Image (cartoon, grey):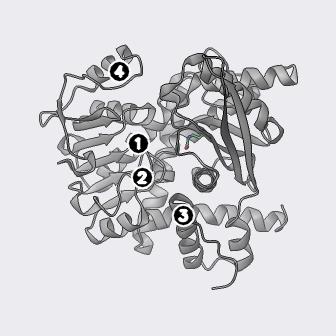
Amino acid sequence: MSGTRRTATNVLLHTALENFYGAAEEMRLDENLIAVLGNSERRLEVSVPTEMDDGSIKVFKGYRVQHSSAIGPSKGGIRYHPDVDVDECEALAMLMTWKCSLAGIPYGGGKGGISCDPLTMSMKEKERMSRTFAARIAPIIGTWRDVPAPDVNTGGQEMVWFMDTISKMHAQVEPGIFTGKPISYWGAKGRTAATGYGVATCGLELLKVLGKEPASARVAIQGFGNVGSYTALVMSEAGAKIVAISDVTGVYYSAKGIDIKKAFEHIEKHPKKLLEGFAGADKVDYDIVTADCDLFFPCALEGAVNEKNADKLKAKWIVEGANAPVTPEADKILDKNGVIVVPDFLANSGGVIGSYFEWAQDLSGYFWTEDEYNQRLMHIMKGNFKLVWDYSQGKKIKMRRAAFMAAIQRVADVTKLRGNFL
Ligand code: GLU
């Protein structure tokens, strides 16, 4: 169409742009708005010199991308992974804009990360790297500017290093700049499990609208980190049979069902919180995407379901716990095969909704009980699931397209209200 479309060689950014342009066209969104929202407000690259334990200095590359601040401060995690680059951060930042918009919380979208392999680094090396990174992105983050959070391979400890560094720079305690902090240091009860609870809630709501009982569903979950483990726990507590789980150490399968509490106990004892050596299931050597199950939760990394394995998927339903785990090519194959997909930015929004609760508590200095937190989270997740499900049924479109259209509409409305030059 017009010259407002961007192209990208990075697969994830290409996917993010294609999904956006496709939905924007179906909505007949104004070309100016397509141009504004198809670009990011800011893409920052920083170098992160870090003293390693052997005394040498390694210079890592770090990024923070702010896709949008139309609705409010940019919001989104920081990941530590060798594949992190600025385009990947931008794609994930765009996804955060739609996620926050659909969730109905007062944020735009951002994402950041460091290209590194945290699994090979000591705690002290990670601390030095994290603190330098926080200082380098300090000029563009803030309670009312951009609020980072955990993502792949980061958690409460990294948030404490970040917050402590910025608090020292500002000579005052700064709890509202980062979310996903430990309960003992300005965190919120419920935040750790929030993403997984939300993902599982979407799985259970999907079963409900399809008229299925949780006990009749055989479930496979890819990834046993923060998202996958709590998704597994909540699904098994609801009565579903978890037949397969996995992490970087392999795939663990049991037709009888896996005792998820035992898997939790196992990772708690493992130095890197991994399933390695887990005796509660058989270790198998096939791709978990192809596991014999009804409901599949990809809760690991992007691109897990792709054109190579999508046709071999046995599950009838997918709930995306990870960000962008299904490639657009795979999406087409799944659609042809009648597989229903609950999209990432609806399914895993429990994390950022939980972050919003934490931020609101930090700003008011008044903390809720875990019960209050979970009640409010469930309420919002169920409402948002219903909104997207009903919209997709009414318009006879996929849930992903419906979610995109609802999310883009809110950002477009605010952008128009404020004027094009934000
Ligand atoms: N990293 C999470 C996500 O992708 C949480 C982001 C946040 O809480 O800001 O949604």
At label 2, the amino acid type is Pro
Disc on the earlier residue, 3 or 2? 2
**Upstream in sequence: badge 4 or badge 1:** 4
Q: Are marks 3 and 2 in contact (CB under 8 Å)?
A: no
Inspect the image, locate mark 1, and give the three-letter code of the amino acid beneath it: Ala
Q: Nearer the viewer, mark 1 or mark 3?
A: 1
Residue where numbered disc 4 is placed: 267
Q: Can you tell which of label 3 and label 4 is closer to the viewer?
A: 4
Residue type beneath disc 3: Phe
Mark 3 or 2, closer to the camera: 2
Distance from label 2 to label 4 (Cα)?
A: 23 Å
Against 41, residue 405 (above or below) is below
Q: Residue 14: which disc?
A: none
Identify the mark nearer the N-term, 3 or 4.
4
User: What is the x, y in percent for residue 191?
Assistant: 54, 29
| View quadrant of ligand 1 | top right
Report the front residue among 42 and 357: 42
Verify CB contact (< 8 Å) between mark 1 and mark 2.
yes
Residue situated in front as seen by the camera: 9 or 145: 9
Question: Marks 3 and 2, Cα distance to the nearest angstrom?
Answer: 16 Å
- Circle 4 SS class: helix
Badge 2: few (under 14), some or many (20 or more) residues near its Cα, within 10 Å?
Answer: many
Residue, disc 1 = 300
In percent of width and height, residue 287 lies at 25, 47
The residue nearer to you, when weighing 417 against 15, is 15
SS for callout 1 = loop
Disc 4 from disc 1: Cα separation: 16 Å
| Residue that numbered label 2 is attached to | 325
- Crowd around label 1: few <14 · some 14–19 · many ≥20 (10 Å): many
Task: Find residue 279 and report its horizontal and vertical position in percent.
Answer: 19, 22
Q: Tell me how far mark 3 sits from mark 4, CA to CA.
A: 36 Å
